[in-house]
Every structure is written in C-alpha cells, then in structure tokens.
Image: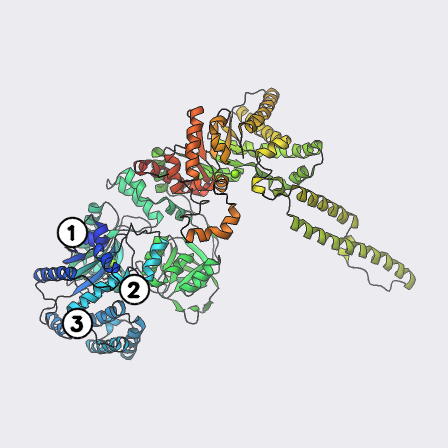
C-alpha cells in the first residue's frame, strides 16, 4: 500500500502540478525553487480538500493532522521561531488556492498563532506594542469572520466607534492603547456571538482555519463564480490550503505591502504597474480601506526597494513567459513575494502584450495567438466617449477598466441584478465593492466606486469581465442606504442616468454619446498572423452596401451570405414588393418586379465592387411572402381606424353642407369648422380601406400553419419563377457592369431550402436561360458560380446528388438545427430551451453553439458525400453559429473552407480559425 502524501513544503512541491497544489501553492513552490524570496511554508493538497468535503462529518483525517504538525516543525526550524511559543512566536497565514484562479472568492486568514501569550512575545520581540495589537485585532476579526462566522459589522462598529472617539480617519492613526481596547472588544464580540471564548490553542486555531478554507470551496460566492465562468469540476477540483510564515508590512514606515502587474493590464504597456501602502497588511490594498499609492511613487520613496521590485518583475516574466499579477510585502526593508499568477487583462492589453512579447522573444507567434480568448475581442468593439462631446465631468476617479458605459445608477448588487435581467442598462455605484457583489457586476454596464484604486476588488473584477470601471472617485459621497450619491451640489437618485469613462476616470451626469472604437495596430498585426495560420476563411453576412463596407473593415474575406430580402424591406422598396405580392396576374407581378430590378441591380453592383476580388454569395429570396405584409391583426386594426376616419370625413361633409345650409338661413351665425376636418377626403380614405382589405385577403390566403416549413425558399422560386428571374437578371446585369468596369467580380448564386436535386435543376434551367439573354444583350461572358444552401435534412442525405449541379454548399445551420431537433426556434427559445440548459438536458442553446453531435454529424456526412461527387467542393457555414469559437473549431475539424458570420464577429472568428488550426491535433469528438 502506498502512503498518500497530503502536504508538500514549498521546497519540494511540483510547481507544474496546479491540479494537486492549486495555482497559488504551485507557484509558491516554483518561486521558492527558482530562488525568489518567498516566506517559507507548505501546501495541503486539493485532494485532501476533496477527501475532507466527502466525509459528512467534516473531520480532518489524523494522517493529515500529523503531516501538518511535521511541516509546522520544519517551519519552526527554518524560521527559528515556535508555533505558540510565548517568547518567540511563529505566526502563519492560512490561504486558499484552487487550480483555476478565482480572485477573492475564497477565504484567507492572516496572523494565525496569536493568543494572549504569544501576543506579548510578539510585542516584546518587535518592541512595538502598537504593531502587536494591530496584528491581533486583525486576526480576531478575520478568524472570527471566516472560521467562526461572525459578520464583519459586529467588529466594525467597535472599530468605528473608537476611531470616532480618537477623531481619526484611518486605522493607522490609532494608538497602541486604542488598538488594545479594540482587541478586548473583539474578543468579547466572539464570546457573545459564538458562546465560546476565542480559541487560545494555536493548533486548534490552525485546524479550524484549514477546515474553514476547505469549506469556502462550497461557499455561495465561489459556486456563483464557477458557474458564471463555466469552471467545471475537472478544471478546478477543490482548493488547496497554503500555510505561510507571516511577514509584516505593518511594522512601520520601512514596511509596506503591495500588488502589481508586470505590465499595465488596462493598456498592455510594458511598464511597472501597481499600488502599495506603507505600514499596512496585505488585505488593506485590495479592500480599498485606504487609497494606495501608485508604484511609481516608490521610486522616490524607497528607491532601493523599487529597484528590487523591478528585478522581481523581470524575473517573474522571463520565468513564466507571461504577464504576472503578484503580491508582495516589505518587512523592515526586505522584499518578499507572496503570490504570483498569470495576469488577467482586458482584450486591449492582451492583444498588445501578445504582439510585444513576441517581438521581445518571450513567446512565439503561435503562443501569442493562443493567449487571447477570441470572445474577449468583443471588448474591443466596446464604445468610447465621443471626443467632441463638450459635457463637463462632475467627478474624477481612477481609470480602472477602460471603455465607456452609460446607464441608470443602482446602489446595490441585488437591485442591479434585478434591473439588469429586465434589460435595463445600469451602472453599479458603490462606496467599494466586495466579492459578494459579484452578481451585480454581471448585470452592470459599468462600475463606479468612491474608494479604492486600480487594484481594488471593483477594478480587478471589472477588468476581467471587460466592463468599464471608475474607482476611487473620492468626491462622490455614496449613501447606499438612502440610495443616492452626492457629487458637489448634485444629488443622484437611483435610476438617474450617468456616464462613466473607465479610460479617463471621469464621471458625467446624463448620457454622453459614445462612438465605436477603431482597431489598434497590434490587433491588426495579431489578426494578420491569424490569417496566415488559419485554414478556414472568414466571411461576413452582409446584405447592404453599408454592411458590405463594414464587413471589409472588420477583415472579412468575402460575403458568405447576402440576403436579398433585406433589400426588399427598405422603406422605399416595400410598397413595390407589396404590389408584387398583391398582383392578380403574372403580368401585374412583372410590372412590380420591373420596378425592383434596377434597385436590386444597383445594390448588387455596389456590393460586388466593395468586395472585389473577394467572393459574394447572393442568396435568392428565402422568406415566405407574407413576411412582407403586415400581420392580420395589424391590418384589422388599421382597417378599423380607417373606417372611423371615413365616418368622420363623411360626418364632416354632412356637417359642412348642413352648416352652409344653416348659414344661408341664419346669416352666418355658425362658427367655421376647423381646417383639418375640411381636408379629409372621404374618397381617399375609402381607397385606402379597399387596399388594406385586399392586403388582408392576401395575408389570409398566404397564412400558413408552419411558415418555417411552408411556402418559402426554392419552393417560392419554382411556383413564382418571375421573382427569381428578376433577381437572377439583376445579379447578372450587375456582374456585367462590373466586368465591363474591369472589376474582378467573384459572385456565387445560392438557392435556399433545397431538398432535392430536381429543384436545383429547375433553377439552373432558369439561370441558363437568363444568362444567355444577358450575355447577348451585354456582349459579355458572365463569370459566376452556382450552389445551394444545405439546411434541410434531406439535402444532407442527398448531398452526393446535389453536388452534381451545385458548385458549392453553404450550411444554413439555423434551419438545419430546427429541422434536426424538430424545434421551432422562437417557440423553443421562449418556452423550454432555458429550462433545458438550466437542467442540463442540453449543455448549450443549439441555435447559439453548434450541436456538434447531432447537426455536426449531418454536416460531416454531407461534406463527405458532396466531395465524393465533386472533390474540392467549396463548403462553408452561414448560420449564426459560424461566429462562435467552439463551433468554428468543429467547422475546421470537419473540413469546411469557410465560416460566415455577422461583421462584428469577424475578428473573433479569424482568431478562432487560427486557434482551430493550432489546436487541431487535440480536437476529438465522440459521436
Ligand atoms: P487572496 O486570494 O484573496 O489574494 P491571499 O491568500 O493571497 O488571498 O491573501 C490575502 C492577503 O494577505 C494578500 O494581500 C496577501 O499578500 C497577504 N498575505 C498572505 N499571506 C501572507 C503572509 N504570510 N505574510 C504577509 N501577508 C500575507
Ligand atoms: Mg492573493
Ligand atoms: Mg435558412
């Protein structure tokens, strides 16, 4: 039987084994082993945590306790102090740390090992009474809260009272006597609230603390966080406990504590970044209790230490090849590193550091591409404040997470969540935020705090979510009880709109106009690398010339889906489309279509020119006709209104003739009738009524029980060939114009809803006829490709035969998903899909994330059959899922040539396509 090892000293643990030691523990081991100055300590493994949590009695197995005791002994030897020794006490911190970093989500206890006796030893040894009581009161409160469940407020009220009595703002200004009194009050609080005295036995303290940290793994905060960031049990299984010898940043003015990033996590700039507080302990910086100083100040205040810090920062980066987020403490002039982890950055910083670190030789191009989560690029599409806006800021805080946000002020996280869910845009306004506010962050557009700095909780969390944050705006007085904030003379109530700019730290009243951001040079470089590596091409779905321009701006390599119905819907065209639908005879229909032809031709010509030489895939009309008519309900309402109007106009005519009659008799005694009534023409109204009635009849005639499965797509093209004929002619004439202008057009005509090869044959015949005519009329040879959507299950089964005529396939995965699941999308999303995903019946909404196992299998089969008939057949996807990174990975895997998505998702898809290529070896699916 192998004996299991539960505890590893920092000198022996494997720095690569985050799963076993947690991220914090593994890095503490690694830093120790590469010679950085880390206080000695040890890690209790995540496996121990799981064993502990599995046992319903929640006891630490005796083997664990034994190992812990052995390691404490070793610590005593290294530090030459004794745990519980009243003359020379060893104090430790007990810290959580899981495999995936979850900042602030679990608990840590500092200064453990203090009791009434060791306290005296600490005081004697340091010859600093104030320091001793300060450490003790911190320990009692933290241990009381984390391990014994006594809420902060019970402690804070005493601390605040004593601060008031001493007339000081910060706790650093309290004297030793004040703090001694605080300690006594705190001990009483624990006695009252728990019914027991505060534990004096240091091993008992340690055991309780270890259990409390293990338990915090199952705390609500931690569970919420894991759910929000989709952290699965396999990724982060339990938390380790790190027991670390204490070092003190609160030993006077040659002591300090700070946090830093090796590069600026807001901009990516390669500069020292961070904040520190002199004479303070770790938690103080993050908690925003005092507003800390920027690390640059240290260069003047403690130049020798600043130099050490710069060196630490370089060592960390060159060892980890990644931007590091680290914590340190300076005890009487000696710098200790207490933690490091990969820095969480916003997308701007990620992109910039990727490109710069590649140039510096720290990482390869491939690593640079894999560092950035494609979804995070979405942040770069966040708005900025319009620089032309002349509104003056009412407050200035610290720019803590860039981007502008406009929304209604909300003063607590619960309310934020409530309003956010109902679709309101909100700004969460707090004095400072705490980990338990996390749900409010998810709901908010931006976060504004009146206390704390760039590394405060609010700032760190907002940045990791890519939300705008202004922190430490000290001239704002936030009163969350009264639900208001006071800025100078302005009182802001809950619901009032404000604008914050996380890039400048400014706060404005009202809504300031925002403008979309431009691509940075670094993003262009990074996406350029992506395009070199990716096999998949990325196209955009774009229906109008404006959208085509946007698509090109975002780097689309063509248009994978140009929906012609969007062109029909514009205000100037819809009436003609309606005429076409109401037509009683083919001739009437043709008259309307003749009017549409030049409009479509002009649109196509422009789009083709914008995209040349890239491909544009034009889809012939797809939706059912009644989509262009108002609904039956709307028509009935309109008709009812028109009838009222008609009655009035008739009444007015009566009244008008009556009044003339009366005037004749009584010599103009009646008042004249108001002008608008005069001008209603009953005949016009009655014409409008009969038009609407005609539309109503048509709408009823076209009504379908299942419009999505009804008279649409190619079926419409076959029964009303005039419509497709007009569209085909418009496309051909546009190609002819471009060819004559020597524009390298690359056009593909795509037929929607195809189920059988016969449908394609039918449309192809129509195309060939028109082509011959246009070629003769224009004296050109038209260049184009002919292909089909694959969005009907039968088309997948018959792909081999469709490929005989079709030169390309494009998967319409919205319809194909509906057909595969037999879900109608709207009904599914409104009625049962949310339950399905919540209950885990489905992992994702298949309309957002491609259902690889079902729809994906049909796709794989289609690709295989299609290419059997036509090797090298071009195949792509134009459903909404085409912009989703996970779906893109699958599309790469299954051998597609391109994905097509909405224009703003194109950058995301380009990066995802490169990552799909880089990670293809790792991709596996089980069907
Ligand atoms: P979190 O994950 O919330 O950052 P940590 O375990 O890192 O929790 O600890 C909280 C704070 O206490 C940090 O600022 C850290 O630097 C500080 N700290 C932790 N252990 C020690 C120690 N042994 N000596 C001094 N400060 C410590
Ligand atoms: Mg930490
Ligand atoms: Mg479709």
Q: Is residue 820 above or below residue 259?
A: above
Which sits in the foreground, 319 or 922? Answer: 922
Percent from the top left, x then y, of residue 106? 28, 60
- Image quadrant holding the C terminus, namely top left
For marks 3 and 1, the one nearer the N-term is 1
Give the alpha-carbon distance from disc 1 to disc 2, as whole Å.
Answer: 30 Å
> Is residue 498 visible from the viewing direction of this image?
no
Q: Nearer the viewer, mark 1 or mark 2?
A: 1
Percent from the top left, x then y, of residue 679? 77, 52
Question: Circle 3 sits in a helix, a strand or a loop, which is it?
Answer: helix
Q: Label 3: which residue?
A: 132
Classify residue 713 by image quadrant. top right
- Report whether 593 appears left or right of 249: right
* Image point (70%, 37%), residue name: 583
Q: Which mark is residue 13?
A: 1
Q: Label 2: which residue?
A: 287
For marks 1 and 2, the one nearer the N-term is 1
Percent from the top left, x then y, of residue 348? 35, 47
């Amino acid at each position: 039987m192998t004996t299991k090892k539960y505890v590893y000293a920092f000198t022996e643990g494997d720095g690569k084994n985050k799963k076993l030691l947690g991220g914090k523990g593994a890095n503490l081991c690694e830093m120790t082993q590469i010679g950085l100055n880390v206080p000695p300590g040890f890690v209790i493994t995540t496996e121990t945590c799981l064993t502990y949590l599995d046992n319903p009695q929640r006891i630490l197995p005796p083997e664990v306790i034994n190992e812990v005791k052995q390691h404490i002994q070793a610590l005593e030897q290294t530090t030459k102090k004794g745990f519980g020794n009243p003359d020379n006490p060893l104090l430790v911190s007990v810290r959580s740390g899981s495999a995936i970093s979850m900042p602030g989500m679990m608990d840590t206890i500092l200064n453990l090992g203090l009791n009434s006796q060791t306290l005296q030893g600490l005081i004697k040894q340091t010859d600093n009474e104030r320091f001793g009581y300060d450490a003790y009161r911190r320990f009692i409160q933290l241990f009381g809260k984390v391990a014994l469940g006594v809420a902060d407020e019970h402690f804070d009220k005493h601390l605040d009272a004593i601060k008031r009595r001493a007339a000081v703002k910060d706790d650093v200004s309290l004297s030793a006597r004040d703090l001694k009194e605080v300690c006594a009050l705190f001990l009483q609080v624990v006695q009252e609230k728990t019914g027991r005295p505060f534990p004096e036995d240091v091993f008992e303290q340690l055991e309780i603390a270890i259990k409390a940290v293990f338990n915090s793994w199952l705390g609500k905060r931690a569970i919420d966080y894991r759910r929000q960031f989709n952290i699965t049990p396999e990724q982060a299984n339990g938390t380790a406990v790190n027991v670390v010898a204490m070092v003190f940043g609160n030993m006077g003015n040659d002591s300090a504590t700070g946090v830093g990033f090796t590069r600026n996590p807001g901009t990516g700039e390669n500069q020292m970044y961070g904040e520190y507080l002199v004479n303070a302990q770790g938690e103080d910086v993050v908690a925003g209790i005092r507003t800390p100083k920027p690390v640059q100040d240290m260069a003047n205040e403690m130049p020798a230490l600043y130099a050490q810090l710069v060196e630490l920062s370089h060592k960390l980066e060159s060892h980890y090849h990644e931007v590091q987020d680290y914590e340190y403490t300076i005890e009487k002039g000696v710098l200790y590193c207490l933690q490091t982890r990969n820095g969480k950055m916003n997308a701007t910083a990620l992109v910039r550091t990727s490109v710069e670190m590649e140039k510096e030789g720290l990482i390869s191009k491939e690593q640079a591409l894999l560092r950035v989560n494609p979804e995070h690029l979405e942040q770069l599409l966040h708005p900025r404040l319009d620089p032309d806006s002349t509104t003056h800021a009412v407050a200035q805080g610290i720019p803590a997470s860039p981007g502008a946000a406009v929304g209604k002020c909300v003063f607590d996280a619960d309310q934020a969540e409530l309003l956010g869910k109902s679709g309101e845009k909100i700004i969460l306004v707090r004095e400072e935020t705490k980990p338990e506010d996390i749900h409010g962050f998810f709901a908010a557009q931006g976060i504004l705090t009146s206390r704390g700095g760039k590394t405060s909780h609010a700032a760190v969390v907002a940045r990791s979510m890519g939300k705008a944050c202004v922190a430490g705006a000290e001239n704002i007085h936030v009163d969350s009880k009264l639900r208001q904030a006071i800025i100078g003379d302005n009182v802001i109530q809950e619901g009032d709109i404000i604008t914050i700019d996380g890039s400048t730290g400014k706060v404005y009243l009202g809504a300031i106009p925002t403008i979309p951001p431009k691509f940075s040079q670094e993003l262009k470089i990074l996406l350029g690398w992506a395009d070199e590596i990716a096999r998949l091409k990325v196209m955009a779905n774009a229906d109008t010339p404006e959208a085509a321009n946007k698509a090109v701006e975002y780097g689309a390599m063509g248009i994978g889906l140009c929906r012609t119905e969007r062109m029909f819907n514009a205000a100037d065209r819809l009436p003609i489309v309606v005429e076409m639908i109401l037509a009683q005879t083919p001739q009437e229909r043709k008259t309307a279509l003749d009017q549409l032809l030049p409009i479509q031709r002009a649109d196509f010509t422009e789009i083709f020119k914008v995209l040349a030489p890239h491909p544009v895939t034009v889809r012939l009309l797809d939706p059912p006709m009644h989509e262009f008519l108002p609904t039956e309900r709307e028509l009935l309402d309109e008709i009812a209104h028109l009838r009222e109007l008609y009655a009035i106009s008739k009444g007015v005519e009566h009244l008008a003739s009556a009044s003339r009659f009366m005037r004749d008799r009584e010599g103009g005694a009646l008042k004249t009738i108001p002008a608008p009534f005069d001008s209603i023409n009953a005949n016009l109204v009655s014409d409008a009524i009969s038009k609407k009635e005609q539309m109503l009849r048509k709408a009823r005639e076209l009504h379908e029980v299942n419009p999505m499965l009804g008279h649409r797509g190619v079926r419409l093209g076959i029964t009303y060939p005039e419509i497709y004929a007009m569209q085909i002619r418009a496309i051909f004439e546009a190609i002819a114009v471009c060819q004559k202008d020597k524009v390298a057009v690359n056009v593909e005509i795509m037929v929607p809803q195809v189920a059988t090869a016969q449908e394609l044959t039918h449309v192809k015949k129509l195309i060939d006829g028109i082509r011959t005519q246009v070629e003769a009329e224009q004296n050109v040879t038209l260049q184009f490709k002919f292909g089909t959507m694959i969005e009907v299950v039968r088309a997948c089964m018959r792909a081999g035969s469709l490929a005989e005529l079709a030169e390309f396939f494009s998967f319409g995965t919205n319809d194909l998903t509906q057909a595969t699941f037999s879900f109608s999308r709207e009904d599914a999303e409104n009625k049962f899909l949310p339950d399905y995903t919540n209950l885990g019946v489905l992992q994702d909404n298949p309309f957002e994330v491609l259902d690889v196992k079902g729809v994906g299998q049909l796709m794989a089969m289609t690709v295989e059959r299609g290419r059997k008939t036509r090797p090298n057949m071009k195949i792509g996807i134009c459903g909404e899922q085409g912009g989703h990174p996970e779906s893109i990975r699958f599309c790469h895997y299954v051998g597609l040539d391109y994905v097509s998505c909405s224009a703003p998702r194109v950058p995301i898809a380009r990066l995802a396509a490169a990552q799909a290529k880089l990670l293809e070896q790792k991709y596996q699916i089980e069907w």
